[in-house]
Image: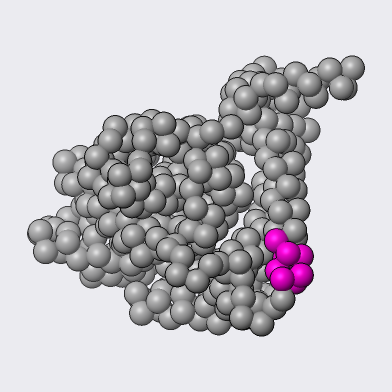
Amino acid sequence: MFSKIAKVLSGTALIKQIAVGLVIGILIAAFVPSLVPVVKIFGDLFVKALKGVAPVLVFFLVMNAMAQKKDGGEDNMKPVIVLYVIGTFCASIVGVILSFLFPTTLKLQVADSQVAPPSGIIEVLHNLILSVVDNPVNAILNANYIGILAWAIIIGIALKAAAGDTTKACLNDIAAAITKVVGWVIRCAPFGIMGLVADSVGTAGVEALIGYAHLLGVLIAAYFFVALVMNPLIVWLNVRMNPYPLVLTTLRESGVYAFFTRSSAANIPVNLSLCKRLGLNPDTYTISIPLGATINMAGASITISVLALAAAYTLGIEVDFFTALLLCLVSTVGACGASGVAGGSLLLIPVACAAFGIGNDLAMQVVGVGFIISVLEDACETALNSSSDVLFTATAEYAERRRNGTLRAEDMVPHD
């Protein structure tokens, strides 16, 4: 019996299995709420497994890529990073424009927060730089991907210069074995998504969200506009082909996972697997994907700019063009450093509020509002952030292929 079930599952596309798991999770939450605590375990195990394996996976994949790298090989990292920065900055502009078109005011209440936001952009950058020189073991234990990347690159370069072929072959086997483990974890996604959906639907405070529907609407509209209009435009400008097959693939096969896990770090293995199926250069994506989970934060820049402007409108502050431009720059820099700050993008809101002269006490009340709507807001934000990592990594490589005359339309869809 189990062999028959396994055969059916292996012959069914994973995305279809996830869709079934999603529906089952909703039905459990709606009609059998007593089962929610039971199926929630599957979701917790899935996310925990992804988060647990991701730092080790990144460390060995990047180290192996650097050790095996051929002299003179191109890794396309500069174009990817440029796309990351452009995408994040343009996303903040979208957030500001929608806030101007649909201004939001909040009913602020005193927020009881146990965490302190950074005092400014300088502190954000300081924390980011210190993350680079973190102890490598501590970086892996705490999923500090900036530190993991730095040490993996350094050790990989050292191994390339000093290690023999046997050592490099052993390292390659270790990286392949860890990748195999990740594949096993991802195959459990339908059960994990079922548990995550049941828990979210069963416990999300829908009543609390209704009071902030306007704010949530502006945020979600901005996320969707960036995902379905702005990002495709950036892709088209680089590859001069219909961008939507690639855009929809990344949203479906990366964004869906990220929406329910609400963790860019947990989605790293999923993105690496998708890049492989897209036929991308592993020397590039093994570095760009974990780097993107750290600095490619279009969704975070939207959240920071929209909530900061909501605070300004609530206090009756006039926002001119140059102040809005400054906010976009602050949101971009702050979003890039969000992963290095406890609390993620929400705790960068006080930094952006400082551009309007709004004090920390009022800014932290806005952070409190952010936490109230974070059930849906954070899910959409993470889906945009994580899917964009694959999108821009692929775009950089496809742009190079276009210049070389080797890009084909079928390259922009994954190969199973």
Does 185 sit left or right of 76 as displayed?
right
> In the rendered picture of this protein, how many numbered marks are placed on residues?
0
Q: Furthest-right residue in view?
A: 1
Residue, x 66% and y 21% (percent of image)? 12
Residue, x 72% and y 36% (percent of image)? 188
**Picture layout, residue 290 above or below residue 37:** below
Tell me where residue 152 appears, x and y as whole percent.
Answer: 60, 72
**Picture layout, residue 18 above or below residue 303:** above
In this view of the protein, can residue 36 be seen by the observer? Answer: yes
What colour scheme has been applied to the protein in the rendered image?
one colour
Q: Nearer the viewer, residue 18 or 244?
A: 244
Tell me where residue 21 appears, x and y as whole percent.
Answer: 65, 25
Tell me where residue 265 appears, x and y as whole percent.
Answer: 57, 55
Q: Quadrant of residue 221?
A: top left
Could you tell me what secondary structure mostly forms the magenta stretch? helix
Find out whether residue 60 is within the magenta segment. no
Does 233 sit left or right of 256 as displayed?
left
Q: What range is drawn magenta here?
A: 165-172
**Picture layout, residue 338 above or below residue 289:** below
Tell me where residue 113 appears, x and y as whole percent.
Answer: 51, 63
Q: Quadrant of residue 55?
A: bottom right
**Picture layout, residue 124 above or below residue 175:** below
Specify the quadrant that holds the C terminus: top right
Specify the quadrant that holds the N terminus: top right
Q: Nearer the viewer, residue 337 or 170?
A: 170
In this view of the protein, can residue 62 be seen by the observer? Answer: no
Find out whether residue 167 is within the magenta segment. yes
Q: Quadrant of residue 408?
A: top left
Residue, x 17% and y 59% (percent of image)? 324
Residue, x 52% and y 60% (percent of image)? 283
